[in-house]
């Protein structure tokens, strides 16, 4: 069974005060693609897209050590993982799919993805 855990609630700033909960249509389309790709590749696995971080108000972004010009503070970024898919495989897929655009970062337990103008890649 496959599922898309990308909702307005999943994107809501975690500060608990500001209510910032933008749901960007382009991010949703990209997460639907990720879900479809891995559900097709692993039809016998439970494939779920799990948002681990979404929008951030400036105060929360500073508190978590986010970049001053983070795409999270303008509702254009999310951090996510996919159940039953390694971070390495997920990162490789995202980089291959978006060779010349967007921001894609690899962390030990999640992928950062943003729809910035231009291209950025990093691993932490």
Image (cartoon, rainbow, N blue to C red):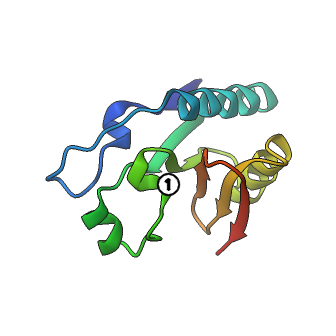
What residue did someone put label 1 on? 71
Residue 10, given in percent of the width and then of the height, sits at 37, 40
Between 77 and 45, the one lying in front of the other is 77
Residue 36, given in percent of the width and then of the height, sits at 70, 25
* Mark 1: secondary structure: helix
Residue 62 visible within the image: yes
Residue 54 visible within the image: no
Relative to 17, does residue 105 appear above or below in the rendering? Answer: below
Which residue appears at 77% of the width and 25% of the height? 40
Q: Report crowding for label 1: few under 14, some 14 to 19, many 20 or more residues within 10 A (C-alpha).
A: many
Indicate the quadrant containing the C terminus: top left, top right, bottom left or bottom right. bottom right
Relative to 24, does residue 62 appear above or below in the rendering? Answer: below
21 relative position to 29: left or right: left
Which residue appears at 68% of the width and 56% of the height? 104
78 relative position to 62: left or right: right
Number of marks in picture:
1
Which residue appears at 25% of the width and 66% of the height? 59
68 relative position to 82: left or right: left
Indicate the quadrant containing the N terminus: top left, top right, bottom left or bottom right. top right
Between 25 and 46, the one lying in front of the other is 25
Q: Quadrant of residue 44?
A: top right
Relative to 56, does residue 82 appear above or below in the rendering? Answer: above
Residue 89, given in percent of the width and then of the height, sits at 78, 52
């Amino acid at each position: 069974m496959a599922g898309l855990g990308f909702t307005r609630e999943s994107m809501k700033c975690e500060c608990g005060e500001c209510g910032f909960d933008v749901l960007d249509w382009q991010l949703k389309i990209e997460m639907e693609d990720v879900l479809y790709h891995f559900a097709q590749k692993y039809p016998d696995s439970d494939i779920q897209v799990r948002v681990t971080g979404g929008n951030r108000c400036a105060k929360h972004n500073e508190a978590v050590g986010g970049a001053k010009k983070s795409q999270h503070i303008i509702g254009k970024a999310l951090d996510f993982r996919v159940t039953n898919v390694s971070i390495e495989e997920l990162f490789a897929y995202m980089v291959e799919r978006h060779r010349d655009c967007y921001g894609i970062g690899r962390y030990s337990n999640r992928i950062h993805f943003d729809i910035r103008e231009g291209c950025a890649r990093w691993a932490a």
